[in-house]
Amino acid sequence: MITLKFLSAWLKLAAVAAVAFVIEVALISSLWLGLLVIVPTVLLFLGLSAAMWREWRSVRRGDGAYSYSYIRYEQE
């Protein structure tokens, strides 16, 4: 289940990055200005992808940031 959630979130991120890239290429005609805008977009996409992948791996191993444990108290 976590894999499907990860893929869903990553595909949304990839779609947003692709739309941003297309808009940047369509609106900016200068090569250097284009690179100045496109490179941070690509780096942001890669950074977010790496962070999502690391969290997915951690959750699969059971030690993710969002994991918690149940403590069962028994009355004696």
Image (cartoon, rainbow, N blue to C red):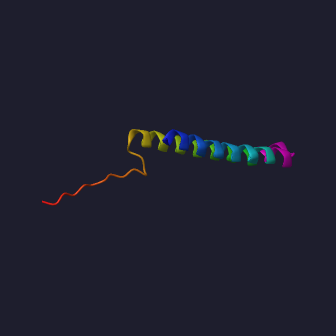
Look at 75% across and 46% down and name the residue there.
Answer: 19
The x, y position of residue 76, in whole percent, is 12, 60
Provide the major secondary structure of the magenta segment: helix
The x, y position of residue 42, in whole percent, is 68, 43
Residue 31 is one of the magenta-drawn residues: yes
Look at 49% across and 41% down and name the residue there.
Answer: 1
Q: In the rendered view, would you say 73 is above or below 63? A: below
Residue 69 visible? The answer is yes
Q: Is residue 17 left or right of residue 26?
A: left
Look at 70% across and 44% down and name the residue there.
Answer: 15
Residue 36 visible? The answer is no
Of residues 19 and 7, the one drawn nearer to the viewer in this rendering: 7
Q: Residue at the far left: name it.
A: 76
Q: In the rendered view, would you say 60 is above or below 70? A: above
Residue 66 is one of the magenta-drawn residues: no
Q: Residue at the far right: name it.
A: 29
Q: Is residue 57 left or right of residue 41?
A: left
Count of marks overlaid on the render: 0
Of residues 59 and 73, the one drawn nearer to the viewer in this rendering: 73
The x, y position of residue 47, in whole percent, is 58, 44
The x, y position of residue 8, in whole percent, is 60, 43
> What range is drawn magenta here?
24-36
